Image (spheres, rainbow, N blue to C red):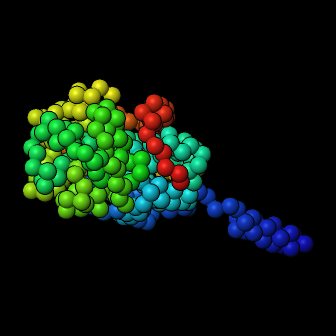
Amino acid sequence: MFRFLYSISLFCAIAAIFTLPISSTAQPAYPSRPITLIVPYPPGGGIDPAARIYADALEKALGQTIVIQNQGGASGQIGTNHAAHSSPNGYTLLFGSVAPNVILPAAYGNQLPYNEQKDFAPIGLIAQADYVLLVSAKLHVNSLKGFLDYAKAQTKPIAYASSGQLSGPHLAGALLSNMSGIKMLHVPYRGNGPALTALMSGEVAFAFDSAGGVVSRGKSDKYHALAVTGDQPFPSDPSLPNLGKLYPGHNVSQWYGLMAPAGIPQNVLDRLKAAHEKAVHSAALQRRMQEIGLNVITDSTPQKFQAYVDNEITRWRHILATQKIGIPKL
C-alpha cells in the first residue's frame, strides 16, 4: 500500500513539473534576430545617409543586424503606416521624421490611417538640421538675392520640386512664396531622389533638400546651394544666408528619431532606449553625422521626444491655418 501511494505521489510531482508555465527567462534574449528599420522614403534622398549612419551605430550597440527597408510614397505616410501597424515586438522600428510624424498629423488629424500620438512608442531623437535651398544651374544665378530677383521678374509662377505633398521641402517653398510674395508652382515627387533628378534636369527651377542629402552628395554642377532655412549658421558652410533672418518665421527643419509600434514590451523598450543612447553618444556616429551637416541630439528621452512631437504638431497646425497653405485631400 505504501509503495502504491508513493508511486502515485511521485507521478503527480513529475506531472506538475511538466505542466508548469515556461519561465520568461527561457525566452531568447532580445534581439535574437535581425531588426527591420523602416525608412518611409525611397533611396537617394537626404534621409537615406542619416538612416544608414544611425543603423550602423545601433547595430553595434545591440549586437544584432539592422536591415533598412525603404518604403516611400505619400510624403512618408505609407511606410509610417506600415510601421504603426507592425507587430510591437521590437523587430520593426521606424526612422521617424518631420513630414509623416508631425506635418501630416497636423494637417489631417484622424483622417490618417495611423494616429501619431497613440500608435507609436517614441524612443529618442537622433539628429536635426535645416533645409538647403538648391537652385538649378540653368537659371545662371549664384546668390540668394540673384535668385529672388530672377523669380520676381517671371511672368509665370516659378516651379519647385519637393518629396511630396506637405513634406518639409514643400512647406519650405510654400512659406518662401507667401513671405516673399513670389508666385511659385509646387511640383510634388515620390521622394527627394526623384525631386532632385527633376532639379538637375532643369524640369524645375529650385528645390529644398535636407542638409544630410546636400552634404553627402557633395558639390554639383547641376545646381547651387544658395541659402538655408531657419536662423542658425549652416555647419558645413556658415557663409550661406539664412531665410529665417530674411523672412522671420521661415523656420522649417528636418529631424530624425527612432520610434517603435505602441504596445512594445517594457523590457524591449528599455533595451532599445539603452542602445539608442549608446549609438548617439558614439564618436563614430557623431563624426559621420556632422560630416553630412546634421546636429546630433544626445539628451533625448522617450518623454522629451513625445513632448517635442506634440508641440511640433501644434505649431504646424497653427502655421498651416495662418499661412493658408492648401491641404490636398487624402
2, 314: nearer the viewer: 314
Q: Is residue 271 visible?
A: no
Q: Classify the position of the N terminus by image quarter.
A: bottom right
214, 52: nearer the viewer: 214
Q: Residue 135 in the image: state x and y as whole percent.
A: 18, 48
Viewed as shown, does residue 39 lie left or right of 296? Answer: right
What residue do we see at 26% from left, 36% from top? 229
Q: Residue 66 in the image: state x and y as whole percent.
A: 36, 61
What residue do we see at 17% from left, 56% from top? 217
Q: Image quarter for residue 187?
A: bottom left
What residue do we see at 86% from left, 73% from top? 4
Of all residues, the one furthest to the front in this rendering is: 155
Q: Residue 239 in the image: state x and y as whole percent.
A: 10, 34
Q: Is residue 184 visible?
A: yes
Q: Image quarter for residue 249?
A: top left
Count the marks: how many?
0
What residue do we see at 39% from left, 44% from top? 98
Q: Residue 328 in the image: state x and y as whole percent.
A: 49, 49
Of all residues, the one furthest to the right in this rendering is: 1
